[in-house]
Image (cartoon, helix red, strand yellow):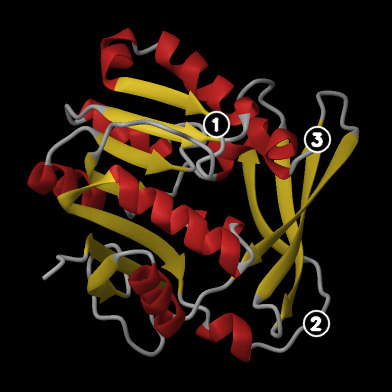
Amino acid sequence: MSFYVTIARYYDAEHQDKTDDLLMYSELANEYGGPVFEVGAGTGRVMFHLAKAGYEVHGIDIEPAMLDRARKLVESQPALKNRLTFIQDDVLKYKTDKRYPLVLVPYNGLMHFHDQEQQLKVLRRLHELTTDDGLLVLDLPNPADAFAAQDTDAMIFEKTFLEPDTGHLVMQYSISSVDRTDQLIRINWIYDEVGGDGTVKRTLAPVNFRFFFYAEVRLLLRASGFTVEAVYGSPELDPYEDGCERMIVFARPTIKS
């Protein structure tokens, strides 16, 4: 079973406090217009925000379990239906003639592409989807802290939340290690769900994410036909500098001379 099949029913409750990037995306949509294309749309966290702001959004995700939850949410918000298009497909294989003024890969989305061939393929595909005067946005973590930290194999308590379908309390933990050679972080997410009778059901959800360094991202984008316009250390567009949490890259299709 894939990672997102396993955690789909927890995803929205787990990330309900992940809102810090939404203003950035709506401001960019206001500047560049729509429709907006989102890679790794999941359950629609960013898509619904932009649709509520009046923008048409097309979101692609390979995992139907995540998109099914997004489609179910639309049923309770029918006014947004005509602004939202959910595409269940592999972005590496997805074909369309449509091009977009704003293409988003939010919240660690690029980290699912582990090898360089895949990375170049997806960025070249996004180049095909971006208008000549459009913008690509990549939101990634700054890897510095993870690479500097010492591995402990400790189980870390992350948060508690209520699973929305049942109202059950869920306690989330993680065990992670960093493979500094392959630039991977290997995480075992643990969800302990407390049933109505007090019994605890444990769900394990392992996943690997690929870290990127800024110089590497810049080279990958250049090889894919993009030029980096700016890099920021937060969704508030703070400077990208030592100690910042994020690496948010704005890139444009390179103008050919």
Residue closer to the observer: 64 or 147: 64
User: Visible in this render: residue 19?
Assistant: no
Residue 226: which disc?
Answer: none
Q: Which residue appears farthest toward the right when viewing the image?
A: 199
> First in sequence: mark 2 or mark 1?
1
Q: Residue sitting at 74 percent across and 63 percent down?
A: 187
Residue 89: which disc?
Answer: 1
Residue closer to the observer: 160 or 31: 31
Give the structural element (helix, strand or loop) at label 2. Answer: loop
> First in sequence: mark 3 or mark 1?
1
Three-letter amino acid code at disc 3? Val
Looking at the picture, does residue 92 appear above or below residue 118?
above
User: What is the distance, in whole Å, between disc 3 and disc 1 at their CAs?
Assistant: 34 Å
Quick check: 18 left or right of 131? Answer: right
Q: Residue sitting at 88 percent across and 24 percent down?
A: 197
Residue matched to label 3: 194
